[in-house]
Image (cartoon, grey):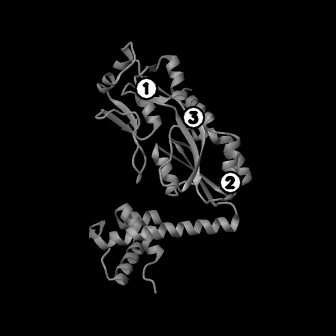
Amino acid sequence: MLRISLDALLTVDTIARRGSFSAAAKELFRVPSTISYTVAKLEEDLGVQIFERFGPRVVLTAAGEELLREGRYLLKAAGDLESRVRRVASGWETEFTLGMDSALAPLGLQDDIRAFYEAADQTRLRIVKEALSGAWESLLDRRVDLLVGAAGEGPSGGGYTAEPIGTLRFVFAVAPTHPLAAIGRRLDKADLAEHRAVSVADSVRLLQARTVGLLFGQDTLSVPDMQTKYDFQLAGLGFGFLPEPWARPDIDRGRLVEKEVEEPKPDETLYMAWRSGEEGQALRWWRERLRACPPVERMLALKGRLNHP
């Protein structure tokens, strides 16, 4: 008879992530005594201590770390199995998640979303935004079902199918008050090295993080998404490349200054991507819809309008 249940593994995982029994109880919508009993019963059944107790704070023991390391594979496999069973039974996924790069405006999909709800009113829709390689990782890690506008080529190793659906152009821009704005020639590396860059941090968790357009040793202000990067450059806190549809209205109004640089940033191809071998009704619907009505241009144009009311 198995002594480790999926519920016990889920409880251990939640405690480890949240740092205490009470915090885990809140996330799992249970009372703390139930969490304590589950852990105590598992420790008794296995004959090992899983957590070190330091008052309300708990830390995994070496045995607990090994249990959780392997147990997470079982939790993921169980979740995948549940998902496949639901898809087989209904044809339509009960929940479908779209992922996209932080440079894109989800509101640009509003017409597509309305049409989707008419076709699949029982499927819950979620939208997730990531930065750089974080979007690709969210697909491979099953946090999203379809990428709509993932930047750059995906990671090696396969496991997914990708189709280009648009291109993102960039301009180098600074605020009029920034020292680089006063230089009346093309900027070289020496010019940039003296000032701070504003860079979007890759939201990747496990894959290799990606950096774009930074010099070695460059003083960098790292921000969580493209919107924050844009706002900080508009405020004069640094320099960098910005999506051309975002920046062009402010350049025309004199709120940003476009500069030529020695090494311009090439256009970025944006992809639609999904995991290989999956064929749910919602996935099929979105693929066909986005092939017929590519979304990138309107998502970028709308983002530009949202930035410049």
Tag 3 secondary structure = strand
Which quarter of the figure has residue 280? Answer: bottom right
- Disc 1 marks a residue whose amino acid type is Leu
- Residue highlighted by disc 2: 284
- Residue highlighted by disc 1: 234
Q: Residue furthest top?
A: 184
Q: Residue furthest left?
A: 54
Residue 30 appears in the rendering = no
Q: Earlier in the sequence, mark 2 or mark 3?
A: 3
* Viewer-side residue, 53 vs 288: 288
Tag 1 secondary structure = helix
Seen in the image, is 236 located left or right of residue 53?
Answer: right
Q: Earlier in the sequence, mark 2 or mark 1?
A: 1
Q: CA distance from mark 1 to mark 3?
A: 24 Å
Tag 2 secondary structure = helix
- Disc 2 marks a residue whose amino acid type is Arg
Mark 1 neighbour density, 10 Å: few (under 14) some (14–19) many (20 or more)? many
Q: CA distance from mark 2 to mark 3?
A: 23 Å
Mark 3 neighbour density, 10 Å: few (under 14) some (14–19) many (20 or more)? some
**Is residue 239 placed above or below 24 in the rendered structure?**
above
User: Nearer the viewer's eye, disc 2 or disc 1?
Assistant: 2
Q: Are marks 1 and 3 in contact (CB under 8 Å)?
A: no
Q: Are marks 2 and 3 in contact (CB under 8 Å)?
A: no
